[in-house]
Amino acid sequence: MNENYQEQAVSNMSVRRINRVRVLKLLFRAGSLTQMDIKNQLGLSGPTVTQALQFFTGLGLLREGDEMPSSGGRRPRLIEFRYDAFYSAGVEIRHHHVDIQVIDLRGTVVVGKVYRLVFENTAEYWQRVNALIKQTVAAAPVPRPLLGVGIAFPGEISVSKNMVSRSTVLACRNIPLNIARENVENVLSVEYGASAAGFGVVWREPSLQNAVYIVVTNSGVAGSVIVDNRIYRGTSNKPGAFGHIVLDPNGLPCFCGGRGCWSAYCSLRNLTQSEEPDLERFFTELRAGSQAHIRRWEDYLNRFAQALANISLSFDTGIVIGGKLAPWLEPYMEDLRRRVADYPVLSEEELSIRTDTASLSPIAEGVALTLVSSFLDDNLEGRHFDDL
């Protein structure tokens, strides 16, 4: 009898938790609704909705909004989601820099900065990263509690997420992540950078079902595969290494040790011929008619189109290009699509190739968004609703 009672109590708690999450996520998507709207849309009882609203109002995630016109009787009042209730921090690790972005629950960047810091997997390095995170969060206009920190690497993360199994950008293999976790406070997510960026575009565009996401970085090209509105992880968490598609086996040397990789031709460093890429300067010269810049851009577009053609043939799905290059590439997208379609086997296909300009730091923002997503599902380590 006692065991049955305990099982029933656990079951009731589970149902209550699920319904609370449903209420919160509905308000998150809608922004604001009346209590009756919530009850009708979710098919929940009045007391269940009332209890959930009181619970989340107490946590500071909801607040009362304006009164609505009455159809008779007491005027209903909107319940609003507070997107500024918490912040989430995302950190992109690069070879010579760290990009730290702090977002609110809507995904809007509150404050962010890129700091020069040469990577080394030491306690001193990660302590410096921790200090920079604190410094960045402290620069937010309005102080808010921090959900946690997500870290994205330019390398493949082991299935157990306790190791960066390979990072050609950082020139190392099997990097243990315990040093990072021991020296950076509140690390709750570790992700492959391109997967984090892909997660960000899925988050912003729930209608995006299947696509390949490409992000161009200073050192190369990376990507992720989106299937059924989720990041495809593959067998060992290593999909989307498009930057090492070989475009010319006898071509330019790549940092991976091979030759002719897409990354070797289409990194931002190769485009701008500078260790610190200045895209504004490059495109200013291009538009001014500099012949050297025109030739470099022509070669860049041809190589880019060659790689996109390979992806189009392999995946038969839309392609989204993000990162710092995206807003500069936008005026040339029709030209790029034409070059892809010049491949005879693709000439009659309807190609969906577009840019994603919603974020200039898609990797750091994307890994911060993974925390927000887990939080709304009440699955974030150390931040369960009952513990707040």
Image (spheres, rainbow, N blue to C red):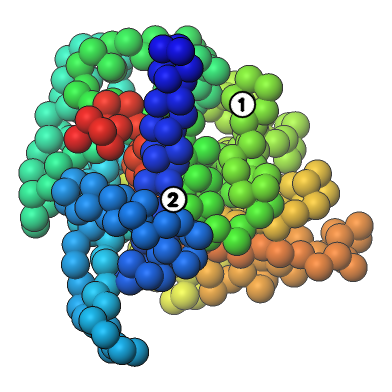
Q: Position of residue 371 (x, y in %)?
A: 36, 38
Q: Secondary structure at mark 1?
A: loop
349 is higher (above) or lower (below) than 97: below
110 is higher (above) or lower (below) than 133: below
**On residue 210, which mark appears?**
none
Q: Position of residue 20 (x, y in %)?
A: 37, 46
Residue 236 located left or right of residue 156: right
Visible residue check, residue 7:
yes
At x 33% / y 67%, what residue is drawn? 35
> Dot 2: few (<14), some (14–19), or many (≥20) neighbours within 10 Å?
some
Outermost residue toward the front in this view: 1
Query: Quadrant where the C terminus lies?
Result: top left
Q: Disc 2 residue type?
A: Arg
At x 50% / y 22%, what residue is drawn? 157
Q: Position of residue 103 (x, y in %)?
A: 27, 50
Residue 221 located left or right of residue 318: left
Q: Nearer the viewer, residue 379 or 135?
A: 379
Q: Determine the image quadrant of residue 92.
A: top left
Circle 2 residue:
22
Circle 1 residue:
238
For the residues marked 1 and 2, what is the alpha-carbon distance in whole angstroms? 33 Å
At x 67% / y 71%, what residue is drawn? 335
Residue 309 located left or right of residue 23: right
Q: Determine the image quadrant of residue 37.
A: bottom left
Q: Disc 1 residue type?
A: Lys
At x 14% / y 42%, what residue is drawn? 145
Q: Which label sits in the foreground, 1 or 2?
A: 2
Q: Nearer the viewer, residue 119 or 108?
A: 108
Q: Nearer the viewer, residue 138 or 374?
A: 374
Q: Secondary structure at mark 2?
A: helix
Q: How many marks?
A: 2
